[in-house]
Image: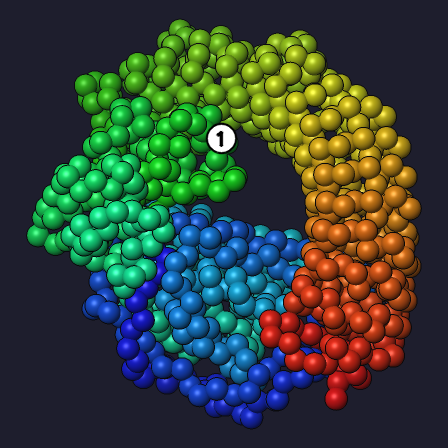
């Protein structure tokens, strides 16, 4: 998980002998953009352009490139791209779907000494060049050197308002299905003009490449920015992209990370200019920051041996630093660490990292080893809460302290080198595919050692059978079991097996051959994905200690006996999104006193939310996205006093919220996007004292806000792209925490209140396509925190405040064409 690197020396840039290499004169910067056509099209693909800079040089590594190790997986992209809800203006205007304000990766908070490398890569991207060519920048180096960290930091700091962004990760053990999923993600995020109002489906990656080629042509005027992380094989790109990329929208950019520069040759043959950036190791000054975390440790000079052995490799430095801290940096206690690092013929690159992982693994307690193996084999990048339920929160904390995994508030991830080594250490007792299963299926001694089985990930495994007697042999050791729907169970002993150690169970179909009566005997089971009820027949009774349940499409709760199917008060998360065919939910919920998360997404036949949901006093997240038939919420809804997140997007029939809605004192995030019939917010809305994020995009009938709205002192983000919104109250300055105000496409908004200039925390003001906006406060440019303001498409704006025309470092301003000098 490397984050920082030594600055290499300079040498010429590698370029392919392709067209689009000329550099026309660059427009001098005024904070403005080229004209917006009328009637209004999509957001113009331009940004402020500074003066031309000389060509960037390729920077060689501080050591020769290292060939990649097979079958490893990098840390995930920090965040997935999020498309804003799209809304049509008045029918007499030309409308083209556009991705507004895409959610770029978050700047990595673990980056150290990365500024110079960021500048180098940003120069190679040449974002400020007016030429129409497209190019790819390849960030390469051995595993653990910090390629993903560097790429993420670069992209997080770019202004991509003019681009449609998509970021994807190619897993080391990816399948053809995974490539199809990546193609779908890229089409959805980067090519909305092609996918809007079109059901894009394809059976294989070849058809996906055909769709990408068509998308290139459909969206010629909107450039794309693609981040492809962890390309390990030439086949990854060959299966993902069409043979020719010359048709990419002009000025598009691709950032790609890889361990082997040779696997990216297809980009040159596909018609792209390629620029390469090799990542070097850390200088001692930055390496010390990782080893000691800026702590004032006596005897630092005694750590020079560790510094030398780690050789500036960020991943190794993190692991060694964690061990040294555990030993209070006492050198005499760290002899074993140094010996482990020096063992072997090659003490550099991946071999060094892998030996370090092995050494740490051997020191872990038995339960923590098992948790590490489960995470590496089955649960990398899963929701942190679910992982803690499965393997234990204490063991997750211990792994984090040992630097074997990183965690955020929601997710956890493991570096690809650590993950690969973890799988290698667990290959004798974790089964990930049918071939591995067949190799041990008839060896009773080996079966008894198996602790995890996950079968059916690949479509090629469809139709294969697993003997239920062989599965019964795992009863004393099995911790994780997943059998997808196309895995068949042969034989039936009609006796229930007690899997004493089973913690996670995922069933793609009815395998009552294993559990003909119930699952209640699985006392350690905490997470269950699968059917429990079908056609009026109970498949399973669930264990009392279950924490997470995701019911599959074969489940059906109508007519079930109250309290029989869903277990008792231990359940904390209930996901019923696959039961969307139901019109109502008759199962009693009053016994679920510990339930924190309830997901009813896509229940498009449910007209009202059962009042019994209001009795879930521990609930902190409720999601009903796509509840197209939902007309109102229960009057007692405000009884959910601990509710922090409420998702009601695309509830198109929802007309109002309960009058007591403001009594939800813990609510922090509220998403009402695309509730197209919502006409007003209740007067009590201002009582939501904890509300931080509010999304009202595409609430097309919402005209104004209640007078109490501006009492939301904690609100930091307000998105309100509403066609009918006519005015903002003058007391907007009461939103003292507001950092982002998005009023794009508010086509009836004529002016902003003077109080907007008192929003001292405001960083982003988006007024794009407010085509009837006539004026903005003259002192708007004096807001101290303002970094971005977009006035493009404000064609009735009479004048631009002088302060917006003055250059200010770190501020980006987009002006309508007729106000450009």
Rendered position, 761 above or below 815: above
Disc 1 element: helix
On the question of residue 353 being in view, the answer is: no
Would you place residue 398 above or below residue 541 in this image?
A: below
267 is higher (above) or lower (below) than 550 = below
Judge left or right: residue 125 versus residue 103: left
Q: Position of residue 587 (x, y in %)?
A: 69, 16
x and y percentages locating residue 501 in the rendered image: 36, 17
- Is residue 743 shown left or right of residue 62? right
Residue drawn where x is 21% and y is 40% of the image: 330
**Residue 360 visible to an observer of this rendering:** yes
Q: Quadrant of residue 261?
A: bottom left
- Observer-nearest of 762 and 365: 762
Residue sitting at x 40%, y 64%:
114
Please give left or right for residue 239 compared with residue 167 in the image. left
Residue tagged 1: 386
x then y, percent, for residue 309:
17, 53
The 10 Å Cα crowd at callout 1, few under 14, some 14 to 19, many 20 or more, is many
Q: In the rendered image of this protein, does residue 755 appear above or below residue 534?
A: below
The residue shown at (41%, 8%) is 496
Q: From this viewpoint, which residue is outermost toward the front?
A: 298
């Amino acid at each position: 998980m490397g984050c920082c690197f030594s600055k290499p020396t300079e040498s010429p840039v590698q370029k392919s002998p392709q067209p689009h290499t000329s550099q026309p004169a660059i427009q001098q910067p005024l904070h403005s953009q080229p004209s917006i056509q009328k009637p209004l099209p999509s957001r113009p693909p331009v940004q402020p352009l500074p003066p031309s800079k000389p060509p960037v040089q390729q920077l060689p590594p501080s050591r020769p490139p290292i060939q990649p190790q097979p079958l490893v997986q990098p840390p995930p992209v920090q965040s997935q791209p999020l498309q804003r809800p799209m809304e049509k203006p008045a029918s007499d205007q030309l409308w083209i779907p556009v991705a507004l304000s895409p959610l770029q990766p978050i700047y990595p908070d673990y980056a150290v000494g990365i500024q110079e490398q960021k500048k180098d890569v940003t120069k190679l991207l040449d974002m400020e060049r007016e030429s129409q060519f497209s190019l790819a920048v390849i960030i390469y180096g051995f595993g653990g050197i910090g390629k993903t960290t560097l790429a993420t930091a670069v992209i997080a700091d770019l202004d991509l308002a003019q681009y449609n962004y998509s970021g994807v990760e190619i897993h080391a053990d990816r399948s053809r299905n995974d490539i199809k999923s990546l193609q779908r993600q890229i089409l959805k995020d980067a090519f909305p003009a092609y996918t809007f109002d079109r059901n894009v489906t394809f059976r294989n990656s070849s058809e996906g490449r055909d769709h990408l080629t068509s998308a290139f042509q459909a969206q010629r005027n909107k450039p794309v920015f693609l981040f492809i992380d962890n390309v390990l094989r030439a086949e990854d790109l060959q299966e993902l992209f069409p043979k020719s990329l010359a048709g990419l929208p002009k000025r598009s950019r691709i950032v790609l990370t890889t361990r082997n520069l040779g696997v990216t040759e297809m980009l040159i043959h596909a018609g792209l200019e390629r620029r390469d950036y090799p990542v070097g190791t850390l200088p001692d000054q930055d390496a010390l920051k990782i080893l000691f975390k800026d702590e004032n440790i006596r005897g630092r000079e005694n750590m020079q041996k560790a510094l030398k052995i780690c050789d500036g490799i960020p991943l190794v430095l993190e692991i060694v630093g964690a061990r040294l801290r555990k030993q209070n940096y006492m050198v005499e206690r760290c002899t074993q660490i140094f010996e482990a690092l020096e063992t072997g013929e090659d003490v550099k690159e991946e071999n060094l990292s892998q030996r370090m992982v092995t050494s740490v693994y051997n020191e872990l307690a038995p339960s923590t080893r098992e948790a590490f193996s489960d995470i590496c084999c089955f649960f990398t990048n899963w929701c942190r809460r679910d992982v803690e339920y499965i393997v234990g929160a204490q063991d997750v904390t211990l792994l984090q302290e040992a630097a074997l995994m990183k965690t955020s508030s929601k997710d956890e991830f493991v570096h690809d080198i650590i993950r690969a080594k973890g799988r290698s250490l667990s290959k004798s007792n974790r089964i990930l595919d049918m071939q591995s299963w067949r190799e041990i299926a008839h060896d009773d001694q080996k079966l008894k050692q198996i602790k995890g089985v996950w079968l059916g990930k690949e479509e090629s495994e469809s139709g294969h059978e697993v003997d239920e007697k062989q599965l019964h042999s795992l009863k004393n050791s099995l911790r994780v079991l997943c059998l997808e729907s196309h895995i068949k169970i042969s034989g039936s002993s009609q006796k229930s097996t007690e899997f004493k150690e089973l913690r996670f169970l995922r069933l793609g179909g009815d395998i009552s051959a294993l559990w003909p009566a119930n699952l209640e005997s699985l006392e350690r089971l905490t997470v269950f994905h699968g059917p429990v009820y079908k056609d009026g027949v109970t498949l399973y009774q669930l264990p009392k200690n279950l924490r997470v349940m995701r019911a599959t499409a074969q489940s059906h709760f109508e007519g079930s006996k109250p309290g029989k199917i869903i277990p008792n008060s231990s359940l904390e998360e209930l996901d019923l999104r696959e039961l969307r065919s139901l019109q109502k939910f008759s199962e009693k919920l009053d016994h679920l006193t510990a339930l924190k998360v309830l997901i009813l997404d896509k229940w498009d036949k449910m007209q009202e939310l059962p009042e019994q949901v209001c009795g879930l006093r521990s609930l902190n997240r409720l999601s009903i996205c796509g509840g197209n038939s939902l007309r109102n919420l229960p009057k007692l809804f405000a009884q959910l006093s601990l509710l922090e997140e409420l998702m009601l997007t695309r509830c198109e029939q929802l007309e109002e919220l309960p009058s007591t809605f403001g009594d939800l004192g813990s609510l922090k995030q509220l998403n009402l996007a695309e509730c197209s019939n919502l006409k007003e917010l209740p007067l009590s809305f201002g009582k939501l004292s904890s509300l931080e994020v509010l999304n009202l995009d595409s609430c097309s009938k919402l005209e104004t806000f209640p007078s109490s709205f501006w009492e939301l002192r904690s609100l930091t983000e307000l998105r309100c792209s509403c066609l009918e919104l006519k005015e903002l109250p003058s007391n907007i300055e009461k939103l003292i925490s507001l950092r982002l105000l998005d009023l794009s496409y508010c086509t009836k908004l004529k002016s902003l209140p003077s109080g907007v200039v008192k929003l001292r925390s405001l960083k982003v003001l988006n007024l794009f396509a407010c085509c009837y906006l006539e004026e903005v406060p003259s002192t708007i440019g004096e807001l101290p925190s303002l970094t971005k303001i977009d006035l493009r498409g404000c064609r009735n704006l009479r004048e631009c405040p002088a302060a917006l025309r003055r250059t200010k470092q770190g501020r980006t301003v987009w002006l309508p064409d007729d106000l450009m000098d």
